[in-house]
Image (cartoon, rainbow, N blue to C red):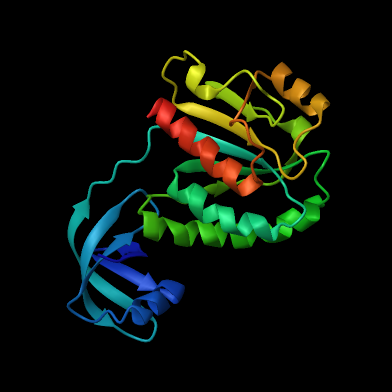
Amino acid sequence: MYRLLGRKESDYLIIEDEELHHLRVLRLKEGDTVEVNDLQGNVYEGEIIQITKKQAVLKPIRKIEIQEDKLNITLYLCMPNQLSKVDDIIEPISQLGVKRFVPVISKRSAVKLSDILKKKEKWEKIALQSIKQCKRLFPVIIENPINLTNIKSEDDFKIVFYEKERENKLKSLNLPQVSNISVVIGAEGGFEESEINFLKEKGFISLSLGDYILKMETAIIVSICQIKFKFE
């Protein structure tokens, strides 16, 4: 069943604007049923009873019980020199259950704060649309960019995956169950040693993703999958 974004108004569900366009593209008509996420933590199954130029009106049939991930992952990603690469990772991290995404400027990031801020709206839009496919309740929260030296985390477990780390791996650690995890991933060229030392001082554990040097996009997927396998 298709899922769209809308709102509950009195005894009805309302779909408007871009979501109404999606409804038409899907060739949905009066009498069809769809799921509607109100972005307030509720998902309803509803029957389309009216479609006009400005909105679609649905009669709620039932409220669908959705259980969000108990594992809260914050991804701190050092920005690549081509910010368009980040466009392609928002949807996968949404599907994998990342809760917060923080763009980070490291010493090897050749992009400006203003350049990242210009992309934020696009990333938020991708995050919002991606929850319909993976059926999450809420989109990934896209934070404002920060410098690596401004990373502050109070999470239960903090990781930096470092390309020069050879000993420690996540699977070999004997850890208690945690619910809040911060993970830092580098971009092209990885980290400078001073940055790793700074993160260690902040309580981050340096870990290896394996014997090979991974592209940023691959490292993100592998790291999140390892975390979910370890703690879920």
- The quarter of the image holding the C terminus is top left
Q: Residue at x 83, y 50 (%)?
A: 110
Tell whether 76 sits left or right of 114.
left
* Residue 184 percent coordinates (x, y): 64, 34
Q: Nearer the viewer, residue 121 or 77?
A: 77
Q: In percent of the image, x 75 and y 34: which residue is there?
A: 148
- Which residue is pictured at 40% across the width and 75% down the height? 22
Q: Position of residue 92 (x, y in %)?
A: 50, 51
Q: Is residue 201 above or below residue 14?
A: above
Query: Taking 25 as reference, is 224 above or below it?
Result: above
Compared with 125, 26 (above or below) is below
Residue at 47% over, 37% down:
225
Relative to 105, 56 lies left or right: left
Q: How many marks?
A: 0
- In this rendering, position of residue 112 left or right of residue 58: right
In the image, residue 25 above or below residue 135: below
Residue lying furthest bottom: 53
Q: Is residue 4 left or right of residue 72?
A: left
Task: Name which quarter of the figure residue 74 lies in.
Answer: top right
- Give how far across and how far down residue 167 sits, in percent: 63, 18
Residue 170 image offset from top left, x and y in percent: 52, 23
Residue projecting furthest to the front = 211
Q: Nearer the viewer, residue 36 or 190?
A: 190
Quadrant of res 146: top right
Work out whether residue 86 or residue 221 is closer to the camera in this orientation and state it.
221
